[in-house]
Amino acid sequence: MIRSMTGYGEASAHEGGVHYFLEVRSLNGKYFKATIRMPEDLQGLEPEIESELRRRLTRGSITVIGKSSDASASAAYQINHGALENYITQLNKTRQVADGSCSVEMGALLGLPGVLQPPSDEEERFARAHAVFMRMLDKACNDLIQMREREGKLLVADLLLHHELIGRNLATVMERAPSVVDEYQKRLLARIETLLQDARVKVEPETLIREVAVYAEKSDISEEIARLTGHLGQFQSLLADSDGRPIGRTLDFLTQEMLREANTMASKSGDAVISRNIVEIKGAIDRIKEQIQNVE
C-alpha cells in the first residue's frame, strides 16, 4: 500500500495530576529526518523516541513536540532551609557593615543557587513520564500512518489517471509508427519525380531503397516503445503492491527512465502525430514525478 509522507498524529493523557501532550507531524523529504522537542527535564527521552520513529517511518521530515504540565502539589520545589539560613547570616553581616542600609527581597533569596531543590521523587516522575510518552507516541504514530495511508490512496488514484493517459498516447504511437516509413517513401518518390520530370532522368530503385532504409534506421522507435511499455507495466505493479514496503525512490527512478525513453522517441521521430502524442506522454510523466515526491 502506497503511503504519502504527509501526516499528523497527536495524543494526550492525564495521570497523577500531570497533563501530557504529544504531536507528530511529517512532511515529504528525501531521507528520514527527525526533529524532537521535549521539555528540558525530559530530553533524555529523545533518543528512544527517534529510535521508535525510525522503526515505524522510513522517509520524511518528522517533527515531534512533547509537553507536560504538572498541577499536583508534588511538583513544588523544596526549600533548602540550611542554605537559606546561611545566606541570611551572611547578608546580616553585610548589612551591619553597611550600617543597615541594604535590604533583600524574599524572591531574590529563593533565586540564589542551592536554595530551591527539585522534588525528591524526580526519578519516579521521569519513569512515569517515560511510560506515558512512549504510549502516546505509539498512538500518535498510528494516527499519522493512517493519515498517510489515506493520502496515499488519493495519490494512487491520481497516478493511475496519468498512467492511463500515457498508455493511450503510447498506443497511438505504436499504431502510427509502422506507417511513418511508408509515407516517407511515398513523399520522397513524389519529390524526386517532380524534380527530375523535366530532366527525364530515372532514379535507380537501389538508390531510393537505400535512402528509405537510412531514414527507417534513424526513425525506428520500436525499442523505445517496448521499453516504455515495460516501464508502464512495472509502474502499475508497484502501485498495486500491498506489502507496505516504501516504493517512493523506486517510482522516482522509474519515471526518470520513462522520461528518457519519451525524449529519445521525440528526437527520433519527425512525424507530427507521433510528436503530439509524445508531448502528452512527457507532460503526464512530469506530473507523475511531481506527485511521487510525496510518496514514502
Image (cartoon, grey):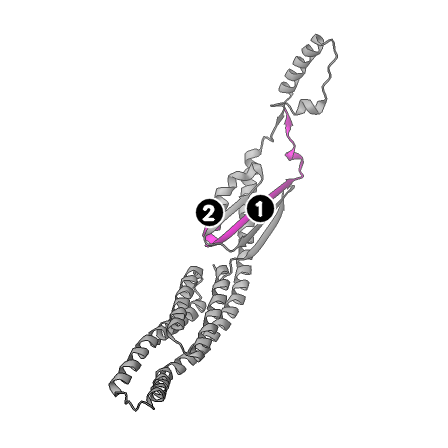
**Marks 1 and 2 close (CB-CB < 8 Å):** no
Identified at 71% across, 23% down, the residue is 106
Residue 134 position (above or below residue 217): above
The disc placed on residue 26 is none
Image point (64%, 27%), residue name: 78
In the image, the segment drawn in magenta is 52-79
Residue 110, image quadrant: top right
Q: Can you give x and y, in whole percent of width and height, for residue 231 in the image?
A: 39, 70
Give the number of callouts.
Answer: 2
**Could you tell which of marks 1 and 2 lies nearer the N-terminus?**
2
- In the rendered view, does 134 fall on the left or right side of 219? right
Residue 60 counted in the magenta span: yes
Who is closer to the viewer here, 186 or 284? 186
Q: Nearer the viewer, residue 12 or 30?
A: 30
Q: Which residue is mark 2?
A: 51
Dot 1 alpha-carbon crowd within 10 angstroms: few under 14, some 14 to 19, many 20 or more: some
In this view of the protein, which residue sits in the foreground, 177 or 233?
A: 177
Above or below: residue 49 compared with residue 158:
above
Amino acid type, mark 1: Ile
Image coordinates of residue 18 in percent, x first then y, are 63, 42
Tag 1's secondary structure?
strand
Amino acid under disc 2: Ser
Image quadrant assignment for residue 120: top right
Image coords of residue 185 (percent x, y): 34, 85
Residue at the extreme front of the image, as rendered = 199
Foreground disc of the pair 1, 2: 1
Residue 282 in magenta stretch: no
SS class, disc 2: helix
Percent of width and height locating residue 173: 41, 79
Which residue matches tag 1?
Answer: 65
Residue at position x 54%, y 42% in the image: 130
Indicate whether 184 appears above or below 229: below
